Image: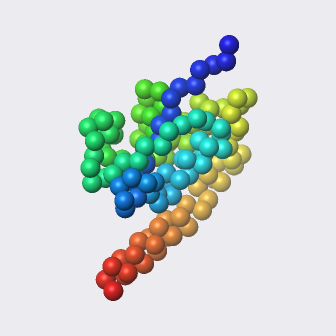
Amino acid sequence: MPEKQLQVELFVKAGSDGAKIGTCSISQRLFMVLWIKGVTFNVITVDTKRWTETVQKLSPGGQLPFLLYGTEVHTDTNKIEEFLEAVLCPPRYPKLAALNPESNTAGLDILRKNKFSRREKSDKDLNN
């Protein structure tokens, strides 16, 4: 009998409309990891202006994104990928971790710079 997959839910910051998925690169990365692994999962957008009681209970610190895997809540975004790689492993799921651990952090500074650049541009647009 096939192994039953636990329910997987990825909670992400909603966009400016409060409903659609926002532009958080970490959320998008976790989405891609789950999608490439072929996992069935739900994405729950969280409007940070209207925290629900459920979200507050799951992530008391308000950390987004976070992952609900069955009944386990994972809020440390640095550890979520490692957790997924450990539990969603071959032969059922493809291995996505790099052979060289330093490869996992390559390019993070580019993402951060891009994020701040986008934020600076949007701040300038608001002031004009």
Q: Which quadrant of the structure image shows residue 90? A: top right
- Whether residue 54 sits left or right of residue 104 in the image: it is left
Residue drawn at (59%, 41%) of the image:
34
Relative vertical location of residue 26 with respect to residue 44 in this rendering, above or below: below
- Whether residue 95 sits left or right of residue 20 in the image: it is right
Residue drawn at (61%, 59%) of the image:
106
Relative vertical location of residue 53 with respect to residue 102 in this rendering, above or below: above
Q: Which quadrant of the structure image shows residue 127? A: bottom left
Total marks in image: 0
User: Furthest-top residue in view?
Assistant: 1
User: Furthest-bottom residue in view?
Assistant: 128
Relative vertical location of residue 36 with respect to residue 122 in this rendering, above or below: above
Res. 115 visible in picture: yes
* Residue 88: image location, x then y, percent: 62, 32
Which quadrant is the C terminus positioned in?
Answer: bottom left
* Residue 5: image location, x then y, percent: 58, 25
* Residue 2: image location, x then y, percent: 67, 18
Which quadrant is the N terminus positioned in?
Answer: top right
Residue drawn at (71%, 45%) of the image:
99
Q: Which quadrant of the structure image shows residue 89? A: top right
Q: Nearer the viewer, residue 45 or 86?
A: 45
Q: Nearer the viewer, residue 87 or 105?
A: 87
Q: Nearer the viewer, residue 121 or 80?
A: 121
* Residue 103: image location, x then y, percent: 65, 54
- Whether residue 54 sits left or right of residue 102 in the image: it is left
